[in-house]
């Protein structure tokens, strides 16, 4: 192998963590063509865990490294949010025994096809843009923590020296409310809401103003008021667009008189 190619290989390996991957799209854009990659694989430097993606030989394929690649190397607006963000932040209520974890990613960019072909323990689920009209910002290390928090996002260390952008609990709860479509979804949100004693009202006000899902806002407010957390009394919702007419998530359920959303009539029994 020539000195020039040795240097390219060293630069590539230096930028790859033990859990990271790199796409063939990125490699081509940076001068690593198919013949050179085939040589790296044959020489035992790289392996291809799925078509269109490479990693260090001997590396450990983990979801954290994959998401880090999406945010940093690929520059995609894809963040950990909703249900998995809440579980990751320690707010998971249900244990789904026998089921693999599902990494719920939100963002304006589509999930590259190679992600779902990786032999990960977890399943990756792209959930779309989410229920907010906030501007898209880069999720790379150059974006400040303050800029992230303005959008209800935060940087969290996944494994040593690997930081990922995910939704704060306030944003993740609204994302989960938007995903709820039946009684089971409402039970889950309600159980999680019971433990949300430390949400920040100012941050919630900003997110509620930028949330375009009437269902998500009504469900969130109805369940938050039901559990009577101290922060709820500091939440200003005057002027918040809650739409008109009734919203029903559960046929034959009970209409919340204030927020005009039909919820299961047995919420208390579900909490146990």
Image (cartoon, rainbow, N blue to C red):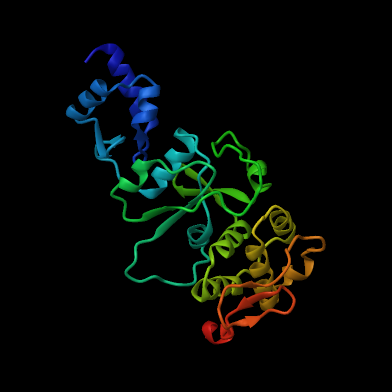
Furthest toward the top, the residue is: 3
Q: Is residue 132 above or below residue 34?
A: below
Residue 230 % position (x, y): 73, 72
Residue 224 placement, left or right of 94? right
Query: Where is residue 123, by image quadrant?
Result: bottom left
Q: How many marks?
A: 0
Query: Where is residue 23, by image quadrant?
Result: top left
Q: Residue at x 51, y 63 (%)?
A: 90
Residue 144 % position (x, y): 63, 38
Furthest toward the right, the residue is: 238
Residue 101 appears in the picture as rendered: yes
Quadrant assignment for the N terminus: top left
Q: Residue at x 53, y 62 (%)?
A: 179
Q: Is residue 124 above or below residue 38?
A: below
Query: Where is residue 192, by image quadrant?
Result: bottom right
Residue 71 placement, left or right of 217? left
Nearest the eye: 60 or 185: 185
Nearest the eye: 206 or 127: 127
Q: Is residue 156 above or below residue 77?
A: below
Residue 61 appears in the picture as rendered: no
Residue 13 placement, left or right of 41? right
Residue 47 % position (x, y): 24, 36
Q: Is residue 116 above or below residue 48?
A: below
Residue 60 % position (x, y): 30, 45
Q: Residue at x 33, y 30 (%)?
A: 24
Furthest toward the front, the residue is: 245
């Amino acid at each position: 192998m020539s000195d020039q190619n040795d240097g390219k290989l060293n630069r590539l390996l230096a930028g790859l963590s033990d859990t990271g991957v790199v796409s063939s799209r990125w490699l081509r854009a940076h001068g690593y063509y198919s013949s050179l990659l085939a040589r790296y694989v044959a020489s035992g430097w790289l392996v291809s865990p799925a078509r269109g993606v490479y990693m260090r030989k001997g590396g450990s394929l983990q979801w954290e490294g994959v998401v880090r690649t999406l945010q940093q190397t690929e520059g995609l607006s894809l963040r950990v949010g909703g249900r998995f963000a809440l579980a990751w932040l320690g707010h998971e209520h249900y244990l789904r025994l026998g089921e693999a974890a599902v990494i719920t990613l939100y963002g304006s960019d589509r999930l590259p096809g190679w992600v779902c072909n990786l032999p990960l323990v977890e399943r990756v689920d792209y959930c779309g843009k989410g229920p907010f009209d906030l501007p898209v910002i880069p999720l790379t290390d150059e974006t400040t923590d303050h800029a992230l928090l303005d959008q209800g996002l935060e940087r969290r260390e996944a494994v040593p020296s690997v930081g990922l952008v995910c939704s704060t609990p306030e944003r993740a709860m609204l994302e989960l409310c938007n995903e709820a479509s039946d009684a089971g979804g409402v039970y889950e949100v309600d159980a999680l809401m019971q433990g949300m004693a430390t949400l920040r009202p100012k941050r919630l006000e900003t997110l509620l103003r930028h949330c375009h899902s009437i269902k998500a806002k009504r469900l969130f407010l109805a369940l938050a008021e039901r559990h009577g957390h101290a922060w709820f009394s500091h939440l200003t919702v005057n002027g918040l667009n809650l739409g008109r007419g009734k919203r029903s998530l559960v046929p034959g359920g009970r209409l919340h008189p204030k927020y005009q959303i039909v919820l299961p009539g047995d919420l208390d029994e579900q909490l146990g």
